[in-house]
Amino acid sequence: MAANRAVVIGAGVGGLTAAAALHRRGWRVTVLERAARLEPVGAGISLAPNGLRALDVIGAGDAARARTAWHTEGGLRTPSGRWLSRTSNQAAAERFGGPLVLLHRAELIELLARALPDGAVRTGAPAEVTDPGAAGRPATVRTDGGPYDDGVEAGLVVAADGIHSAARRALFPHHPEPRYAGFTTWRFVVPAPAGAEVLPHETWGRGLGWGSQPLPDVRVYAYASAAVPAGERVPDSEHAELRRLFGGWHDPVPALLDAVAPESVLRTDVYETAAPLPAYHHGRVALLGDAAHPMTPSLGQGGNQAAEDAVVLAHHAPPGAADLAAYTADRLPRTMRVVRRSGSAARAVTVRSAAGCALRDAAAVAVNRLGPRLVLRALDGIADWSPPQRTYAAGTQQPAS
């Protein structure tokens, strides 16, 4: 029956969390993923206490918490290695009621996929919304070369198809597209170099940033950023560019660059919301995650906000009677605040002038003198979020998808 069918476009963090939450709510869920296999793009992903609480709704929070690898002190450094500020996961847990967890994105995708019934995810199925539906009419989704070439009707469609969302363009064709945030990023995962001490840290230079974060399986997730024009690419390799930009920075940065294979370095230009959407829904279609509110990675909140979206959407969506206006009212103001705060954090890293960097670093030192926990204040009002009261019971018998 179309009224109780939910179709999710996109099998990323937001799409899979939404599918699992809606499945627990009682919807018959199908996830349509463009890629031929669930091979997530990216390397590491940070889960803050708010994202972990969202995962609790689908029974996956504790499994993610068990993968935490941050058991030592970490913080912010200069390219020479001097510490500007320090903090710890214990301080984060005391401040926000839970730890910060960093794991490989593939692990998280696998964890989320296990929360769905067999056959719920259809890969190799690029999908488009051909009719958003209305109060008296189901939405229609069509796949190109997939299982629904002739279209499938649904009482709810969840568009979780990323930053350059085709669904968003279809629903709001005259709305500004996401804008370039002014910097590009590189990411890779490598085994921890022998003899190298890798403490969780970020390092800020002049228009450059680096982060090294240990993963729970004795690997290290490394990421870097540079304030460069959009679309810029180097003539040799991204690995060579990382060596030029960061090869002289403090340990363990050179050792990590030595350990990575050139083909394993991922580069992605960063885009953010240019203007808030008028709503996160139209007809029977709901947008979530990057499709609704792309943001810079500077606060590590992209995946966390997508997970929040997912469980709030399910909260407002009893089968056949989704209240998408309530979903928009709950999510649009909060996510746009996070977009703005993430953009402000990004501007601190992309400062290029010597004077500006000196002022930025002095401010970080001053904050550290007041107390190491204060360096976590960027996540105040974000990481302490909790999901709305559940209107359905986890672990109850669910309909087949």
Image: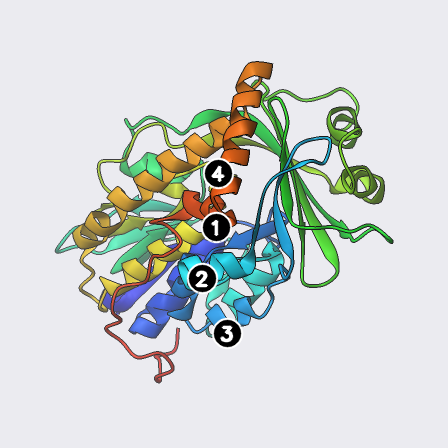
Counting residues from the N terminus, which is met first, the one under dot 3 or under dot 1?
3
Question: Mark 4 to mark 2: distance in Å?
Answer: 18 Å
Q: Residue furthest bottom?
A: 397
**Against 272, is 380 above or below?**
below
Question: Mark 1 to mark 4: distance in Å?
Answer: 9 Å
What residue does disc 3 label?
118
x and y percent of residue 365 in the render? 55, 35
User: Residue at point 32% right, 37% down?
Assistant: 170
x and y percent of residue 339 in the render? 37, 37
Looking at the rendered structure, the kind of residue marked 2 is Glu
Mark 3 or 1: in front is 1
What residue does disc 1 label?
373
What residue does disc 4 label?
367
What residue does disc 2 label?
94
User: Residue at point 57% right, 22% down?
Assistant: 357
User: Residue at point 38% right, 60% down?
Assistant: 18
Is residue 149 shown to the viewer in this render?
Answer: no
**Against 29, is 92 above or below?**
above
Is residue 171 shown to the viewer in this render?
Answer: yes
